Each structure stands twice: as C-alpha cells, then as structure tokens.
Amino acid sequence: MNPISVDKISKSYEKVHALKDVSIEVEDGELFGLIGPDGAGKTTLIRILASLLLPDTGKALLVGNDVVKDFHEIRKIVGYMPGRFSLYTDLTVQENLEFFAGVFGSTIEENYYLIKDIYHMLEPFKDRLAGKLSGGMKQKLALSCALIHKPKILLLDEPTTGVDAVSRKEFWAMLSKLKAEGITILVSTPYMDEAALCDRIALIDKGEILSINTPKGIIDLFPHKLFSLSAINSFSLLNHLRTLPICRDAFLFGQEIHFTTNSQITCESLQDLLSNSGFVNSKVTLIEPTVEDCFMQLMGNSTK
C-alpha cells in the first residue's frame, strides 16, 4: 500500500472547479512534486490530504487512513506546512517548537535528530519572536514544527515561495536528508526548476493532472523540435513567429523565445527565414526542452 493514494478527487468553490478527478499515487519514501502555477489546485489538494478540507467526490488515503473518516489518525501521522506562515508570531522560536511538540505528546529532545540540521541555524535566534524572523528563518522554523512529532508523511504547500535563492537551495537540501530518513514527502511549488529535485512530479493546471512521471521521463516525451531564438525586438519576433505556418508554439522565456515546430527545418533554414523577414540580427539555437517547456506544451494541448 502506498502512503498517499488519491483516487478521482474533485472539489469546487461555487463556479470554480479547483480539482477535477485528480488521481495520484505517492510511493513510500518518495519526494513527490506537485508542480503548477498559482490557481492550479495545489493548495486545495494538499489541504484535503491534511484533512482540513472535504472533497466533493473521490477518495484519498494516507497510510490506509481515509482523510474524511480517519482525520484524527491523519493528524498524528502527517506533518503539514502551509503556504502562509501560520505559527505563533508572539511566541519565540523555542516556545513554538515546545508548543507543537507538546500538542503531539512529544518533546524536542525525543525527535531532535530529525531537526538538528535545521535547528542549528535557528538556535542563535531561539529567544526571538517568530514574527521577527526573516523569511528564510520562518521557513526553517515552520519545517521544524512540522517534523517535531516524527510524521510518516510531510505535506509542504509552496514552502519556498517568497524566500531568497540561498534559502531555497538550503531548503531542498534539507528535504533530501529527510527523504533519507524514510519520510514520504509531497511538496507543491510553482517553480519549474524545483521539479528536477523531485523523484517524480505531477504537472497540474486548472485542477487537472497533465502528466505524472519522473522529471526526465516528462522531458523525454517532449514531441517536437525546440529552438531558442533571440532578437533586438523580442515582441516583434514573437508576433512574427506565431504567423508562420510551421509554428506550433512560441513563448517568451526571459530574454529568449522558445519556438516549437513539427517541421524538419534546421537552425540555418530558420535563420534564413527570419533574415528574409527583416530579423537580420536574430540568433537561432536548437535546444533540449526543460520541464517548463513540457508544461507549456501539455497546457496547450489541454486547451485545444
């Protein structure tokens, strides 16, 4: 039995379909990523798994416990870190940890080995009010409180949103160590670059699962040639590319444009085509897709 089993879960808020027949299986000790933009349904799914929200239809089991019927047991085996900082801002770091350990009938000392790598960064601030911590330190404290009762499953809702790049890197290093302890982790994120740090990922958009696979597996299934293009006027080039008969998709990626085609056109031929259209200083390179490219391609298919 997998520790997380989601079978055709649906949830609506009035006219908004937050989740549509979502099914996911997360394996024991896996670091599983739920990847998608804001409004994709990530938070709704995690709140249902944490027994904080009732699904309209479908069923979800955590270590065999039904998230609706067995919510008391669910809360004993799950560590939950919501997207917004939700600890007690008027308690110190130490007081928050002691409080959450006490709620679960545990102590900081009992499961200290789980949080020691995190807590040594917090210890200099143990007497500081939680509300006075930086974003990265708040994140570390929230993770420590979610772990202090030694959960079997860790549910993390966009834990790196709004923190600096160094804190993001540190956080994912912590997750790798927790995975080595045998904890099953489900983490949601809007950052496509974090997908590569997961064992498997589910790409989700508008409440629907687009694909579930390893990051490499999703990339290997990308079906088209992909070019990176740049020019002095990117917006003019983008609009022009979208008028070409060979264009399947064209999107801005930072300062570049990612262009997909079913055609067998080469970089040189595409360069000539653009030069003949007035884009004489454009640069064309054939590239390997990223998870973000795959997401854009799958999202395009779902709207056609």
Image (spheres, rainbow, N blue to C red):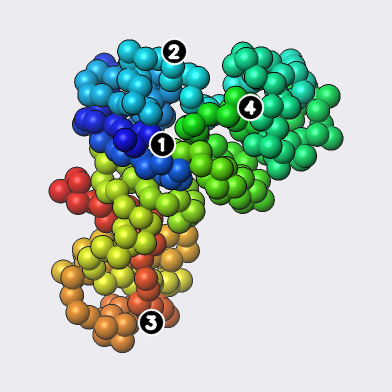
Question: Which of 216 and 25 lies nearest the eye of the viewer?
Answer: 25
Q: Amino acid at mark 1?
A: Asp
Number of other residues with Cα within 10 Å of mark 1, as a class: few under 14, some 14 to 19, many 20 or more: few
Residue 46, quarter of the rendered image: top left
Q: Position of residue 69 (x, y in %)?
A: 33, 13
Q: Is residue 27 left or right of residue 152?
A: left
Which residue carries the number 1 mark? Answer: 38
Q: Position of residue 57 (x, y in %)?
A: 22, 20
Q: Residue at x 65, y 19 (%)?
A: 106
Q: Position of residue 23 (x, y in %)?
A: 25, 35
Q: Amino acid at mark 3?
A: Val
Q: Residue at x 63, y 27 (%)?
A: 148
Which residue carries the number 3 mark? Answer: 280
Which residue carries the number 4 mark? Answer: 148
Q: Is residue 20 left or right of residue 151?
A: left
Which residue carries the number 2 mark? Answer: 72
Instruction: Look at the picture and state if 173 lies above or below 161.
Output: below
